[in-house]
Amino acid sequence: MKYDSVAEIAKKWNVSERTVRNYCASGRIEGAFLKGKTWCIPENAERPKRKNGKETSPERTLLSVLREEKARKIKGGIYHKIQIELTYNSNHIEGSRLTHDQTRFIYETNTIGMEKTSVLNVDDIVETANHFKCIDMIIDAANQPLSEAFLKSLHRTLKSGTSDSRKEWFAVGEYKKIPNEVGGRETTPPEQVAHQIKALLSAYHQKKEKTLEELIAFHVAFERIHPFQDGNGRVGRLILFKECLRNQIVPFIIDDSLKMFYYRGLHEWHDEHGYLIDTCLTAQDRFKNDLDYFRIVYSD
C-alpha cells in the first residue's frame, strides 16, 4: 500500500495540515500511523465525516491530558516533558547554570547529583524546584481569568526560599520597591506599577476570545512594566503558557536556540511585531511535534 504525507492529504482534502494531524492523533483516519514524528496515511484514506453532538466524545486536549497526568503522577508523558523543558529553558534564559540533565534529575528524583568539579548555586536549585510548583499552578488555574492575586502568587512561589527572599528590600509576592531596568531599558517606576498592571489586565479582559498575537502583546506589556524586583521573565512566560491553554492556542517554550531572537523581538516590538511573532510561531511549531508524538489534539 502507498502512503501519503500530511501535506499531500491536506491538499487532496482541501483542509489544513493541522486538521489532518488532528484526525491522525485522534485515530479518525484508518490505517494512519506514526513513523518517527511523521504521519503516514494510506493514499486511499477517506476524510472523516463530521460528527454530530451526540456522537462526539471528549477530545484528548492538552489541558485535559496535563491535568490527568498531573493527578495520576504519570512519568514519561507530556506533563513530565513540559515540567522539565519549560523549567530548564525559562530558568536558563535568566542565567541559571543548572544543566538540562540536572534539571531533569531534580524533577525525577528530588535530589541533585554533583560531579567533583561542579559548583552549584543554591538559588538555581531552589528556583528550579519552585518552578515545578508554578507549572502546576498554571495548569490548575488554566481556565481562570488572570488577576493581580494570581500574578503575585506565582512570584511568591517562584522566589520563596531564595536568597532574595531574605533581603529587606526584596518584596516576594509583591510589586517591586526599587526601580529596575530590563535589557538597558527603563521600566515602570515602583509607585506606578499597581495602576499600570490593573490597566493592563482590564484592557486584556475586554476581549474574551484572544489571538496568539494578543497574548504576545500582553506578554510584552507585562515585561515592559516589569512589576517585580526579579523573576519577571519567568512569571511572564508562565502566564503566556497558561493563557495559551485557556484560549485553546498551542503553547510554546522558548529554548536556547531562540533566546536571542526572543530578546530582539521583545526589544523591537513597538517598531516591528514580526520578529517576536515569528519566534513564537517557530517555538509553537516545535511544540506541535511533541503534541503529535503524544497524540494530543490541538485546534486549527
Image (cartoon, rainbow, N blue to C red):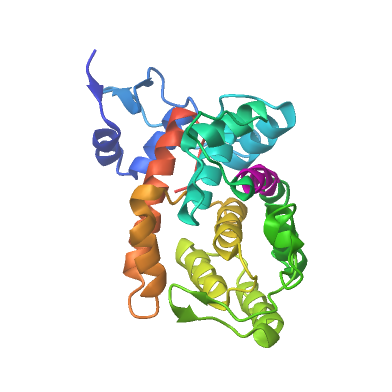
> Closest to the observer: 109 or 215?
109
Q: Residue furthest front?
A: 116
Q: Which residues are magenta?
A: 125-136
In the image, is residue 133 part of the stretch drawn in magenta? Answer: yes
Residue 79, picture quadrant: top right
> Closest to the observer: 78 or 128?
128
> Closest to the observer: 39 or 190?
190
Please tell me which residue is depicted at 56% across the width and 53% down the height of the picture. 241
Q: Left or right: where does residue 159 sit relative to residue 267?
A: right
Q: Main secondary structure of the magenta part?
A: helix
Residue 88, position as x, y percentages in the image: 51, 43
In this rendering, is residue 24 above or below 246? above
Please tell me which residue is depicted at 72% across the width and 52% down the height of the picture. 141
Residue 81 visible, this orientation: no
Residue 199, position as x, y percentages in the image: 66, 82
Residue 113, picture quadrant: top right
